[in-house]
Image (spheres, rainbow, N blue to C red):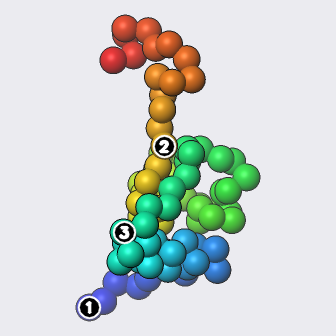
Amino acid sequence: MRKARPSLSRSQIRAVDERRWSQSNGLRIGISGWTYPPWRGVFYPAKLPHRRELEFASRAFNSIEINGSFYSLQRPSSY
C-alpha cells in the first residue's frame, strides 16, 4: 500500500524542482538560516513542528548556513 503524499504549495514544489535542477547541474542553492516565522504556512507546511523546520528545509535546499559561532562568541558550555 502506498503512503499518501502530503500536499505541497506552489512555493514548496518550486523549491523541490529547483533543488533537483541544481543537483543535476552541480549548482548550490541555499538559505542563510531556517528559523523564519514568516515562512511558516508559506514555505513550511502550516502544521509542521518548529523542531522539524531544519529537516524540511534540508530537503528543499542543498546548502543551509548555520554560522552559530560567527555572530557571537559561544560559551564553552555551548560545545
Q: Is residue 2 left or right of residue 9?
A: left
Q: Earlier in the sequence, mark 3 or mark 1?
A: 1
Residue depicted at 73% across the width and 52% down the height: 38
The image quadrant that residue 2 belongs to is: bottom left
Residue depicted at 38% across the width and 75% down the height: 25
Q: In the rendered structure, which amino acid carries the disc numbered 2?
A: Glu
Return the x and y of residue 11 as percentages of the image width and height: 64, 74
Q: Earlier in the sequence, mark 2 or mark 3?
A: 3
Return the x and y of residue 63 as percentages of the image width and height: 43, 54
Extreme-bottom residue of the structure: 1
Q: In the rendered structure, which amino acid carries the disc numbered 1?
A: Met
Quadrant location, the N terminus: bottom left
Return the x and y of residue 74 as percentages of the image width and height: 46, 14
Q: Secondary structure at mark 1?
A: loop
Return the x and y of residue 23 as percentages of the image width and height: 37, 72
Q: Is residue 56 visible?
A: no
Extreme-left residue of the structure: 1
Q: Nearer the viewer, residue 54 or 74?
A: 74
Extreme-top residue of the structure: 76
The vertical placement of 14 against 39, above or below, is below
The answer to whether the residues at label 2 and label 3 have Cβ atoms under 8 Å apart is no
Q: Earlier in the sequence, mark 1 or mark 2?
A: 1
Q: Nearer the viewer, residue 6 or 72?
A: 72
What residue sits right under mark 2 in the picture? 65
Quadrant location, the C terminus: top left
Residue depicted at 43% across the width and 72% down the height: 22
What residue sits right under mark 1 in the picture? 1
The image quadrant that residue 41 belongs to is: bottom right
Cα gap from disc 3 to disc 1, whole angstroms: 35 Å
What residue sits right under mark 3 in the picture? 26
Q: Nearer the viewer, residue 41 or 12?
A: 12
